[in-house]
Amino acid sequence: MNQLRGLFSLLVVFLPLFRFSEVAAAAETKLENVREFTITENDTTTYTLKLALDENDQPSYFFRNIFTPVCLTGECKPVYINFYWDLLGNYTRFDFPPGEVLTKMDHREFKQEDYDKLQDILSRPNSLLKDIAMEDLVGKGTENLADSVDAKAGATLKTVKNEVIDGAVYTCYTLWHIAHGSVVDEMLKITESYKSEPLLHRFLTGTNHFYQYWAMERVIDKTGKLAEPFSTDVLKIIRGKNVFTARFALQKIGDPYFFDPSRQVWLWETYRTAPYPLQLVILKKLTKIPFRAPLAEMTAKDLVKTNSEQFALLLKLLADQPKLPEKAMQNLAAHLTNPNPDYATEIYRVLTAFHPKNRDVLAKMTAYKTKRPSIP
């Protein structure tokens, strides 16, 4: 790895912090302790990975003080740069020791827009740089590396033009591979060793969605059983602002979790205030859950407050129940006077299939049929 880095032109400058994440913000707090790990790559290259611990001796974020000699056209210069990752190996930011600068091939120092673009490049875990070999960026048969997108007509450089900084192609390449290389797997192993109930609670209740996904994979087993100590945390995720983590939680939790009447009430109340995409996920979940009386009653009551697609889905959910409680059928019958004739017709059809015996329901059904004698 050090030999590869020798192909790149790097210098370092003091740089204001970029986009702060939860981890970057943690870097601003006073560290009580730092734990060091010796990492070996390719059986030969070793370096020190550091884990910052908070005042409670709990893991906060990873960082690495990177040093590499950079050699071009026979001239070498030591380079220093610091990288930071969250606890799952997601790159967050970089900064530098005082007095260092990044330069391009012609020794021009990076401008602020170059640093901004570099941060953007390093923040893309699926960059095109991931699948490009070093040899594709190096001019064969020459040691005089131009390090410029425009200096070569090669197809590879044209492909990655938007992924690199002109005049610092190799800099971008090597830094990206350091940020997203095998060190990520090492971080995951280390964090797994710190797994505990407090850490899982912290991940679930935080704002880092990567942490939430990781924790949910560990508190919900393969059968969909949610560990009770984390039930409240996961329910808050379902009602949170992130539709994607909410959907993941709903899909991962097993259906029996919502067989309980009180949880069904909670799920329906969540449905009523959820954004439309999540409402559809909840409706799909409800297709696998036998309705208890409270859920059937609330669904029937709110039935006509939905759009036509949701109306059809909800009415089918009610129609598919083995039986409906009397109160639910009363709520359905109350909608027979709804001004939407399609809604009323479908509700009448479903009520008929349940053969209600309640007098009030039967009276409303008779009144509806009297006004529409063509209905069988």
Image (spheres, rainbow, N blue to C red):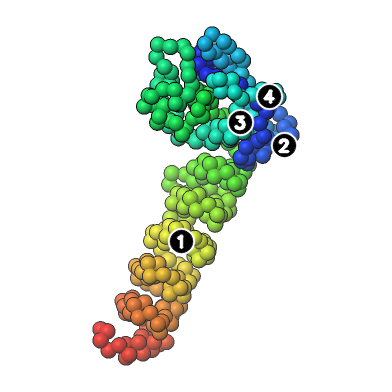
Rounded to the nearest angstrom, the CA distance separating label 3 from label 4 is: 17 Å
The residues bearing labels 2 and 3 have C-alpha atoms spaced at a distance of: 28 Å
Image depth: mark 2 or mark 3 in front:
3
User: Which mark is drawn over residue 276?
Assistant: 1
Residue at horizontal 50 percent and vertical 66 percent from the top: 272
The residue where tag 4 is placed is 97
The three-letter code of the residue at mark 4 reads: Pro
Specify which label sits upstream in the sequence, 4 or 2. 2
- 4 or 2: mark nearer the eye: 4
Q: Amino acid at mark 1?
A: Tyr
- From the image, tell me which residue sits under label 3: 111
Q: Nearer the viewer, residue 167 or 59?
A: 167
Q: Which of marks 3 and 1 precedes in the sequence?
A: 3
- On screen, residue 180 above or below 289: above
In the image, what residue type sits under mark 3? Answer: Lys
Q: How busy is the neighbourhood of tag 4: few (under 14 within 10 Å), some, or many (20 plus)?
A: some
Q: Between marks 2 and 1, how big is the CA–CA gap?
A: 39 Å
* Circle 2/circle 3 CB separation < 8 Å: no
Crowd class of label 1 (few under 14; some 14 to 19; many from 20; radius 10 Å):
few
